[in-house]
């Protein structure tokens, strides 16, 4: 698979997910041994690395919705860099525990193998989420 093909596949998957309003196109294109890394600071249920297709699906369908409800996850740019596709976008989410709503840009770094998503790194300012869990720890 060449770089342009990888870029077009990722763009198609993420654009479709945005248009239909769910992650199914992404889930359908995950490799069985996919690795998802969230750069959210340690100490939240959605921090760290999640390995394997089912664990990544569980992250998005169970863990993440228990912390934040996303109203929008809109990609705005797709860039090929070396062997990775970089997605720049913006989203709006509401924290379940506080009802506070945030607008935040995000970056996904996607690696493809055999036309499937093999690795995802999420870079986003989730300081609102981190702050909630730091407060919770202090009160326990």
Image (cartoon, rainbow, N blue to C red):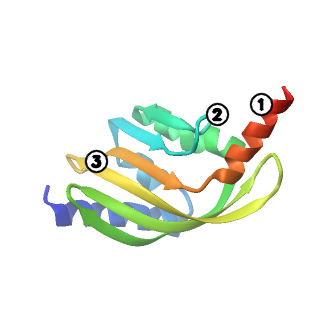
Residue that protrudes farthest toward the bottom in the picture:
76
Q: Nearer the viewer, mark 2 or mark 3?
A: 2
Q: Which residue is mark 2?
A: 43
12 left or right, relative to 37 = left
136 vs 94, nearest the viewer: 136
- In the current view of this chain or complex, which residue is farthest to the left? 2
Numbered disc 2: secondary structure:
loop
Which residue is outermost to the front?
138
Residue at disc 3, secondary structure: strand
Earlier in the chain: of badge 2 and badge 3, it is 2
Binning the other alpha carbons within 10 Å of mark 3 as few (below 14), some (14 to 19) or many (20 upward) gives: some
Q: What distance separates the C-alpha of mark 3 from that of mark 1?
A: 38 Å
Residue at 75% from the left image edge and 62% from the top image edge: 101
Q: Position of residue 104 (x, y in %)?
A: 61, 65
Give residue 47's mark.
none
Residue shown at 66%/52% (left/top)?
A: 127
Badge 2 or badge 1: first in the primary sequence:
2
Question: Badge 1 is on which residue?
Answer: 137
Most distant residue in the top direction: 140
* Neighbourhood count class around disc 1 (C-alpha, 10 Å): few under 14, some 14–19, many 20 upward: few
Element type at mark 1: helix
Tags 2 and 3 touching, CB below 8 Å: no
What is the distance, in whole Å, between disc 2 and disc 1 at their CAs? Answer: 9 Å
User: Who comes first in sequence, dot 3 or dot 1?
Assistant: 3
Report x, y in % for residue 79. 31, 68
Give the quarter of the image for residue 58. top right
The answer to whether the residues at label 2 and label 1 have Cβ atoms under 8 Å apart is yes
């Amino acid at each position: 698979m060449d770089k342009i093909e990888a870029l077009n596949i990722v763009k198609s998957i993420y654009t479709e997910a945005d248009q239909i309003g769910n992650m199914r196109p992404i889930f359908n294109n995950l490799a069985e041994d996919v690795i998802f890394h969230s750069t959210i600071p340690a100490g939240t249920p959605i921090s760290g690395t999640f390995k394997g297709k089912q664990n990544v699906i569980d992250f998005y369908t169970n863990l993440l919705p228990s912390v934040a409800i996303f109203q929008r996850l809109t990609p705005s740019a797709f860039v090929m860099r070396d062997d990775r596709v970089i997605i720049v976008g913006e989203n709006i989410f509401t924290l379940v525990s506080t009802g506070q709503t945030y607008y935040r840009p995000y970056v996904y770094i996607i690696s493809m193998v055999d036309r499937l998503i093999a690795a995802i790194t999420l870079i986003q300012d989730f300081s609102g989420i981190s702050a909630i869990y730091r407060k919770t720890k202090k009160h326990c």
